[in-house]
Image (cartoon, rainbow, N blue to C red):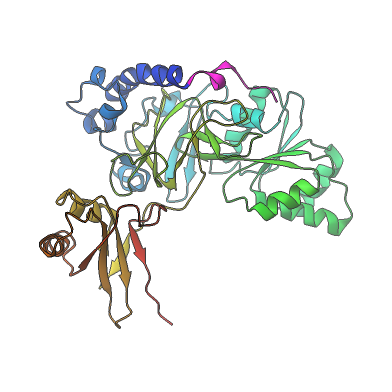
Amino acid sequence: MSHYDSLETRAPAEREAALLAALPGQVAHAQARSGYFSQRLAGVDAAAVNSRAALAELPVTRKSDLIEQQRTQPPFGGLNATPVAGLARVFASPGPIYDPEGRGDDWWRFARALHAAGFAAGDLVHNTFSYHFTPAGSMLEGGAQRLGCPVFPAGIGQTEQQVQTIADLRPAAYVGTPSFLRIILDKADELGSDVSSLKKALVSGEALPASLRQSLQARGIVVRQAYATADLGMIAYESEAEEGLVLDEGVLLEIVRPGTGDPVAEGEVGEVVVTSFNPDYPLIRFATGDLSAVLPGESPCGRTNVRIRGWLGRADQTTKVKGMFVHPAQVAETLRRHPQIVRARLVVDNDSGADRMTLNCEVDQAHASPELGAALVVSMREVSKLRGEATFCAPGSLPNDGKVIEDRRRYD
């Protein structure tokens, strides 16, 4: 399969240099045009933000904070650099969180993902993503039109009408959630309708189980996945190699420890943080709330960009203990006070009949001491206002799943 453009096969060092060269200008643009970032990045020398280390010093903006930010500074919390009058559309995601769409072709950058899924000029695309309130339908339509694909704006629901339309119009391609594709196919079988024109699909919005992929492929439909958000647009997409998701060329990715802005080692699970180069909505270190990890090496498909493992869960592991919320950021603060700790995981259980917190800490044997354990207990109390215990384990022994807080309580 051909690549969308030559950017996809650049030497990794060339791509990294280009991203870092563009970074100071995007930071300066955000400072100058976005009310939010002019305050958030006040005092930052944009010209000096020309490395990953310098980027990691900037504060993280969390998606979970947007609802309150937008409530106080409607409609976009001051994060937009283009005023409403200069936009093409405005959307609402659950929350609500309001999302802008600027003017121009393929503003959400979906054409690259569709091309990797085998979509080609002239393919009629049956788009079952919503066209109402949320931007998903518009996201996919813009990318399809960029490729020269006509689009049927099906939207969601009305399964029998979906089946009839596919049988009548004979589209080659489907975009939507994988589960809805299965529902359409099952309904077609029930009605005796021929929907065999569907040969390719780009799915998003939920997990694609291996069993579902296999059943779809058995019906002659090649399925690829995309990872995007209503704030950032395309983040990463699946290629024919089906080995992780290839990062989009228009974003800079970091994987950070949940509750912090601290990048983790390559391969370690953490929260997806993205800096976009979108002039209308210049998100700097935007934390998606999703967990993933970088895959080593390059894709066999020939694309040389970083790959991630896909969606591995949510980073916000906030839980309530004895009536009080405990946040990943509080675990991070406890660790900052004790640099001997390599990594930690706060386990909450109720095996004794009452809520109990235990901080399991990876630490070199030379540093594991009763004194450090006692100091950790004090720090936990000061930071969370709750009592807890501390235990030590060898470096590398905790699971690599991105969990900072694990709730093991049972109520049966």
Percent position of residue 174, x then y: 72, 40
Query: Image quarter for residue 6?
Result: top right
Percent position of residue 260, x then y: 28, 45
Say left or right for 285 vs 124.
left
Query: Image quarter for residue 265?
Result: top left
Residue 373 or residue 408, whichever sits in front: 373
- In magenta stretch: residue 5: yes
Task: Tell me the residue at 75%/52% (across/down).
Answer: 215
Task: Tell me the residue at 37%/30% (across/down).
Answer: 80
Task: Tell me the residue at 70%/42% (across/down).
Answer: 154
- In magenta stretch: residue 85: no
Against 275, residue 319 (above or below) is below
What's the magenta region? 1-11
Residue 362 or residue 220, whichever sits in front: 362
Q: Residue furthest front?
A: 366
Can see residue 154?
yes
Task: Tell me the residue at 37%/74% (across/down).
Answer: 409
Against 233, residue 209 (above or below) is below
Say left or right for 226 vs 167.
left
Q: Quadrant of the N terminus?
A: top right
Q: Main secondary structure of the magenta part?
A: loop
Percent position of residue 251, x then y: 44, 28
Q: Quadrant of the C terminus?
A: bottom left
Query: Image quarter for residue 32?
Result: top left
Percent position of residue 49, x then y: 27, 22
Against 159, residue 44 (above or below) is above
